[in-house]
Image (cartoon, rainbow, N blue to C red):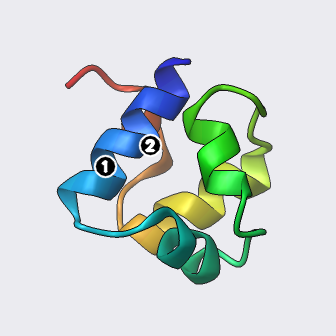
Amino acid sequence: MKFGNNLRALRTKRGVSQEHLAESADLHKNMVGLLERGRRNPSLVTITKLAKALKVKPAKFFAKF
């Protein structure tokens, strides 16, 4: 759940919608919501795509903030 909480925090901090983030990361439009709620576990490829779309290092999803 930490991944999902951090993903949501980073996304909202940048003012990006779930749909726009999914589009930018080349993911299905429902995937971001599922990840944020902890209903799906991200693969390393998905983490990398999200990090690139949000312009952060992948480790940021697992850091305390």
Q: Quadrant of the N terminus?
A: top right
Side (left or right) of 65 relative to 22: left
Q: Amino acid at mark 2?
A: Leu
Residue that label 2 marks: 7
Q: Is 10 rendered above or below residue 38? A: below
Q: Position of residue 19 (x, y in %)?
A: 55, 72
Above or below: residue 65 compared with residue 32: above
Secondary structure under tag 1 reads helix
Q: Is residue 64 above or below residue 3?
A: above
Say which residue label 1 marks.
Answer: 10
Q: Position of residue 18 (x, y in %)?
A: 50, 63
Marks 1 and 2, how far apart in space?
5 Å
Instruction: Name which residue lies at 72% across and 54% down.
Output: 31
Q: Quadrant of residue 62?
A: top left
Q: Badge 1, how many Cα within 10 Å: few under 14, some, many 20+?
A: some
Residue at image position (39%, 66%) is: 54
Which residue lies at the image location 40% right of the left edge and 43% below the top edge?
8
Amino acid type, label 1:
Leu
Q: Are the residues at dot 1 and dot 2 in contact (C-beta closer than 8 Å)?
A: yes
* Quadrant location of the C terminus in the rendered image: top left
Residue 46 percent location from the top left of the image: 72, 55
Q: Name the foreground residue: 39 vs 7.
A: 39
Residue for point 55% across, 37% down: 36
Mark 2: few, some, or many residues within 10 Å (few <14, many ≥20)? many
Of the pair 48 and 19, the residue shown nearer to us: 19
User: What SS does tag 2 mark?
Assistant: helix
